[in-house]
Amino acid sequence: MAANGGTGKKVIIIGSGFGGLGAAARLAARGYDVEVFERRDKLGGRAYVYEVNGFKFDGGPTVITAPFMFDDLFALAGKRREDYVQFVPCNPFYRIFDHTGRSFDYNGNPEFTLKQIERINPADKDGYLRFMGTTKAIFQKGFVELADKPFLNVMDMVKVAPDLIKMQSYRSVYGYVSQFIKDEFLRQCFSFHPLLIGGNPFDAPSIYAMIHYLEREWGIHYALGGTGALVAALGKLVTELGGKFHLNTAVDEIMVDEAAGGQRVTGVRLADGTIHQADHVVSNADVAFTYRNLIDKRYRRKNTDGRYQRMKYSMSLFVIYFGTKRRYLTDTPHALAHHNIILGPRYKELLSEIFNKKQLAQDFSLYLHMPTRTDPTIAPEGCESFYVLSPVPHLGADIDWTKAAKPYRDVIMQFLEDNYLPDLQANIVAEHYIDPLHFQNDLNSYLGSAFSIQPILTQSAWFRPHNRSEDFANLYFVGAGTHPGAGLPGVLSSSIIAENLITGADGGQQ
């Protein structure tokens, strides 16, 4: 231990998404000298905040599950999360509409959810109870026991294989749900969750059915002030712990120690040529981008360009952030909640076009976020704030977004005006949209994927890019592309793994 109570060890973190912020907070609390390099002008990564005409739009994650994981981050530093940012529960968790406008709500109250099921198909009530009973075991194994384990060795995978088979991980989430639920609309309501982490419900293994149980266990929450308030709270915590942030500072290269046989990294070289040394480097940048663009291929024996070209990547997103000069309270054809999912007329076929055929379909399914339902302060008085998200193919598709973006935006906004938000376009006073080119060019995400490596069975746990590089003993990964995957619980779990690996490598120093 250093004389000042620290470890005397330096950690550089590339990127300030929630994985990077979580790792920074944990390692700074353990006494490490932490510096975070962020190429954009604000912290947050995908959780960037856009400010337009007095509106604040959360760029990325809006659904906060497992809030205790944030509490734990602050507690590690001897702080209370409530003193930095406030969480409020959302009820219902989601309001889900089918293509006819029929809606289904669910929350953490089993009786409420059963009454909602009874409205749609009473025969599915028993099936839902059986489904929930099985997801508890999946949650216990997949989240409680395995989410923060590193899976660095193939034997780690072999040990859990019997449990994965027992949990029917060879089934897709949709296939698993369909064993218990017979109504097609309800099947969609209980199987869409992999889309929240970049997966296709028809390909993602059934272990991801645990997301529904995780929601039931701790609820869905909203950070007052938006997700950006949570980013700011973590930034403040890291700074108080002695961590340093460098904004507008792109990393051009991760330096490799040739004297150590090319098996260790020594720090980073910035775009301006400045070199910063470190004992450990943690990348919260996209995994494929990190290996392909930041490390000389001479030193990458395992993590070659070809390895990442062969992997399957999540879909991308088209997101429109918009604010209106009026509130939409009850004067709507269908009453809207904080979190709304609007399903299109096709489910499996649409997802196949997005993930497999890489086609931009004429129809769509949407997630409509309406945070002013809960928190009017993020919009000017009397105004409403929204974002609407449509899953679209990544840049492996033959789509020219410089030409396709505006027409696609117009079709979505017209659909919302015709069906959910009367006179919408006449009332818009703030707007910004992003497409797959944004994910590629601004977020350095390979193929413009919104969630990095697609969560399929052969790209999960040990098969996923490892939290500690196989090529470099002191290079670590956090975020969506490594184990356990995307979503706030996943990326925060990856920061726990990085903390444990680094402190373990240093003899458990803390």
Image (tube, grey):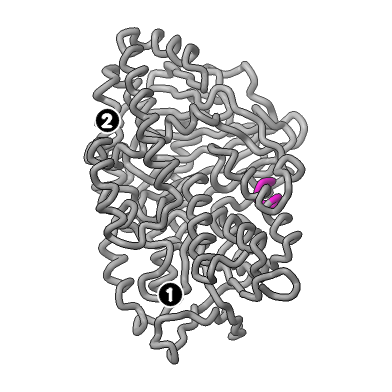
Q: In the figure, 224 relative to 123: above or below?
A: below
Is residue 179 visible in this depiction of the protein?
yes
Residue closer to the observer: 295 or 326: 295
Query: Whole-percent x and y of residue 48?
Result: 60, 53
**Magenta residue check for 232:** yes
The residue range painted magenta reads 229-233
The quadrant of the picture occupied by the C terminus is: bottom right
Q: In the figure, 173 relative to 4: above or below?
A: above
Q: Is residue 337 left or right of residue 302?
A: right
Q: In the figure, 331 relative to 55: above or below?
A: above
Q: Which mark is residue 176?
A: 2
The mark nearer the N terminus, 2 or 1, is 2
Residue type for callout 1: Ala
Which tag is nearer the camera, tag 2 or tag 1?
1
Residue closer to the observer: 126 or 229: 126
Query: Whole-percent x and y of residue 298?
Result: 34, 84
Q: Main secondary structure of the magenta part?
A: helix
Residue closer to the observer: 452 or 474: 474
